[in-house]
Image: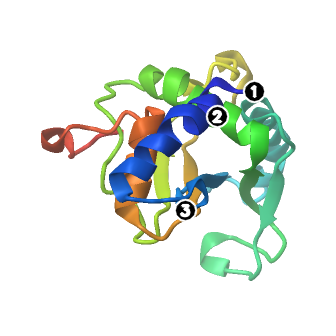
């Protein structure tokens, strides 16, 4: 069992039950899934996206341990040199053990490796208890070999929780070890 999952079951649930006055551990919010995505925009050449997709898919497999889904354009937009069906990016949804392993690596390895890291933004909740985090360089993940990538790309990490309360979700992530920025360091965190 993952150490972060054990921490959630043994410590975090009890702490949140005490703080929020819950009588049952089923009332405590939990992380349901983590959705990662990366958009591919290579404007130099209209067909450049198709050439880099296998590389990005391979990188996502290394980062998540799961085969990602390639997202495609639904409509043609001539201003963006985009046709319907063109690849737009890659996404993957993590649940269960893979989710806990990824979150553990994100908190303990990846975020501290980010250049000039001062903590993640405290206000990036969506009002529904979900947290979004952008990472500017995929090379922050130790699984990515710098020599194997064509260019540095940002990726988006969305942490979806079971509750609809930002305050409780913040406390959940804080207890799990998410390195939130201090109040005075809110500008330009990642």
Question: Residue under circle 1?
Answer: 1
Tell me how far mark 1 sits from mark 2, CA to CA. Answer: 7 Å
Residue 100: quadrant of the picture: top right
Question: Residue under circle 3?
Answer: 27
55 shown above or below 23: above
Q: Taking the image as drawn, is residue 151 in sight? A: no
111 sits to left or right of 148: left
50 shown above or below 148: below
Mark 3, Cα crowd under 10 Å, few <14 / some 14-19 / many 20+, is: some
Tell me how far mark 2 sits from mark 3, CA to CA. Answer: 17 Å
Say which element carries label 3: helix
Say which element carries label 1: loop
Residue at 20% of width from left, 37% of height from top? 182
**Dots 1, 2 in contact, CB < 8 A:** yes
Residue at 50% of width from left, 33% of height from top? 11
Numbered disc in front, either 2 or 3: 3
Say which element carries label 2: helix
Question: Residue under circle 2?
Answer: 5
52 shown above or below 104: below
Q: Taking the image as drawn, is residue 105 in sight? A: yes
Residue 172 in picture, x, y percent from top left: 45, 47
């Amino acid at each position: 069992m993952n150490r972060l999952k054990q921490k959630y079951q043994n410590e975090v649930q009890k702490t949140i039950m005490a703080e929020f006055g819950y009588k049952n551990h089923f009332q405590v919010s939990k992380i349901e899934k983590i959705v990662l995505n990366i958009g591919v925009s290579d404007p130099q050449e209209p067909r450049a996206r198709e050439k880099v997709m296998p590389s990005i898919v391979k990188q996502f497999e290394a980062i998540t341990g799961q085969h990602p889904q390639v997202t495609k354009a639904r409509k043609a937009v001539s201003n963006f040199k985009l046709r319907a069906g063109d690849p737009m990016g890659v996404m993957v949804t993590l649940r269960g053990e893979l989710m806990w392993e990824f979150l553990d690596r994100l908190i303990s390895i990846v975020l501290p490796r980010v250049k000039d890291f001062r903590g993640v933004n405290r206000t990036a909740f969506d009002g529904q208890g979900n947290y979004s985090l952008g990472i500017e360089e995929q090379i922050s993940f130790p699984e990515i070999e710098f020599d194997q990538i064509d260019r540095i790309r940002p990726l988006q990490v969305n942490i979806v929780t079971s509750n609809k309360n930002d305050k409780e979700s913040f406390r959940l992530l804080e207890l799990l070890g998410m390195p939130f920025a201090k109040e005075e360091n809110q500008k330009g965190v990642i």
